[in-house]
Image (tube, helix red, strand yellow):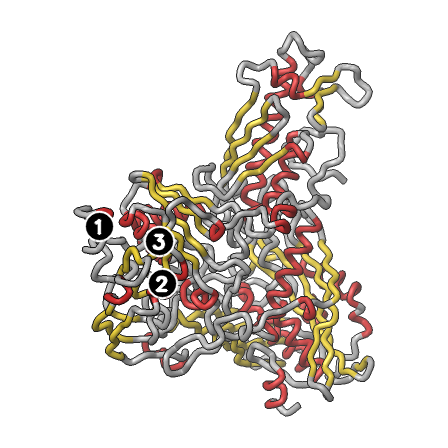
Amino acid sequence: MPVRSLTSPANDFPAIRGKHHQRVDGRDKVTGAARYAGDVALPGMLHAVLVQATTAHAHIQAIHAGLARSAPGVAAVFTGATLTSPASFSARDGQQWSAIQPPPEAFTANFPAERRAPFADAEVHYYGQHVALVVARTLLEAQAAAALVQVDYQPLQATLTLEPALPGAYQPQQFATNSEEKLTSSRGTPPVAPYAQVARQYRTPVVHHNPLEPSATVASWAGDALTLHESTRWVQGSQRIIAHMLSVAPEKVHVVSPFVGGAFGSKGFLWQHSALAAHAARVLGRPVKLLLTRAQMFTSTGHRPETIQDVVLSASADGSLCGTEHHTLCDTSPVGHFVEPCGMTTRNLYRTPFARIGHTVAPIHRATPCFMRAPGESSGMFALETAVDELAETLNLDPVLIRLRNDTLTDHSEERPFSSRHLGECLERGAALFGWKQRSPAPRSMRRDGKLVGWGVASAAYPARRSPATVEATVTADGWAVFRAATHEIGCGTATVMQQVAADALGWPADRVRFLLGDSSYPEAPVAGASMTVATVSPAVDAAAQQLRRAIIAAAARDLASPLFGSPGGQVQLRDGVLSLGSGSAARESATDVLARLPGRQLHCRSRAQSGPRAKTDYTFHSFGAHFAEVTWEPATMQLRVTRWVSVMDCGRVLNPATSRSQIQGGILFGLGMALLEKTIYDPATGAPLNDNLAEYHLPTCRDIPDFTVDFIEHPDFRLNPLGVRGIGEIGITGAPAALANAVYHATGLRLRELPLTVDKLLAAGL
């Protein structure tokens, strides 16, 4: 069935949206033609290297930078004492520069950024804090000079673990100051003497993003105008923040980021190194490139915080939940606020008359954490969905059955219906595809080829969001249709699906449609986060394409030279760039011929899509899914392998099955790493990350990929947007660690409640 917008006239041809379509940037990426921020090289460019604190908490008594300043090739060394007007800058002698300002308060209140400017004070708040910046002719010269900078510290008492920080802990009520999402909530009355109850504590460690592309900034000035080549998934947010920090007008800042090599949190914001690079370029009057090392990514661009979660589930004899409690303790830094909202999904995933959700945040001397793929849901659903399995075992119920029994069409935390919810269908179809009926319930009871086999299940859930977006579109007589929006390509296939939507709605050959993004000068689009890019931008693309199509048809109908002159607009089709009255009609003309006779030889439009057709209070918007995981455990060699995986997702209409499956598989692998491999290890004395490299920080590799089956239940959600699409990028990881934990328990008979699920923990538990 063709996939169309509700508002699209019915062109009589098959739609390309909803079908496999080759990535438009695939060839550029595999051949190296795609240029990332770190690839930018400008004439006269200098290179900057950060000097970082080597202790977690201290007072800086002195920074000795004399040797570095006199080293070969060094243009400048910036410290807190010299940031505004260094004496050694002969190239700009006599020029005074304002200090870098802290990020705007509205930004730091709602996003996990430091609430201070770089080098703002003489106190070290965490290991890796930036204390100086060395700028030189070449990268090697800058690195050599940075090693010469010496810092004298007066040590201060540091809090490096979560529990001792409790005296300074606080309980935020909302996820952000501009958010309606409540972090603390309670409904109903606690159950009295429930038939069954499980009360468990679950833990997740600090984990880091480790995108393939480390963060990079290239800053250059032309007079009072700044161009920033930045590894970011929020070009317009970065534009506003850097303008504020450097005290320039936003229109004087141009942020460019056409390709981003992985993100999911670490590149969602403008971090302090970007402001330092831009400031150095302004003072020195030359372009400056600053590349973060892999190790610096562990201290400079956020991480998923550690959590301690207490979950209590109470149920009647048939497995119906009568009470749910979920309390989370997580860490933040002394100079920034972030909370991992683990209990948000627990509020409404299942039907329960009593629910109590709370979050406590404890500042410790560690860099500020931030959003990481499905923040809150990833950690929180590990705890919740593992506890659901433990409750099912207590009641001697099948794990799929207990989830189906507590399914609901109502968000009881807000007492309003879900716009579209098909979790039960996902569980049932996934169970059938996986062969769940053949599961033997008892742990350690399934074997294959001399190995123990474990099967686990978990639900998946993630909010569906949409923001306003604007798209500019131009179609020209040379046959090109070009669409522009300040959105982003972080590897998810955004440019590809936007091309599909545009070509379909316009009636244009897909290979003659270009979608340009990653530029702050383009029309408004939000951060590429919260799985809302496609749900937000595609309606604007669709509307702009329809507007252009109507304009082309109208131009032909009033053009005496056109064979379609005088034709009613509602009868004219535009297919593959050709106007006609139908497949058998002789009245036909190329749309480019119509455009060639227009005065400007082109048509242009600008279309804005609002945040949604209905008030947010009418419905709760969510996507859902189900994961089924198979693991094998070989006792003789102590090898744990993930061998098979089935996921069924309810994410609204699917625009491109290939990129959508890829997104879900990527999310599952993200969850596999979180569940079995990943943990950042800190030095208990200094707070330094000890495995800040890809040799010792373990990530899934090709050998860890299981046999995947990913299926979609397509129920378009037209209440969210006219195309019926919802986000896909983050739901794949939600529930995946729990499905693995449940499968590991089924294989080994040992229940681990702390991630990662490593062999040493199985041995310590008595395997």
The residue sitting at 30% across, 40% down in the picture is 249
The three-letter amino acid code for the residue at tag 2 is Leu
Q: Residue furthest left?
A: 94
The residue sitting at 66% across, 71% down in the picture is 739
The three-letter amino acid code for the residue at tag 3 is Ala
- Residue 442 percent across, percent down from the top left: 75, 83
Q: Which residue is mark 2?
A: 50
Instruction: Select label 1 or label 2 by which is in front.
Output: 1
Up/down of 699 relative to 196, above or below: above
> Secondary structure under badge 2?
strand
The three-letter amino acid code for the residue at tag 1 is Ser
Q: Which residue is mark 1?
A: 90
Q: Is residue 354 visible?
A: no
How far, Cα to Cα, is label 3 from label 1? Answer: 19 Å
Q: Residues within 10 Å of mark 1 (few under 14, many from 20)?
A: few
Instruction: Select label 3 or label 1 by which is in front.
Output: 1
How far, Cα to Cα, is label 3 from label 2? Answer: 10 Å
**In which image quadrant can residue 59 be found?**
bottom left
- Residue 494 percent across, percent down from the top left: 59, 46
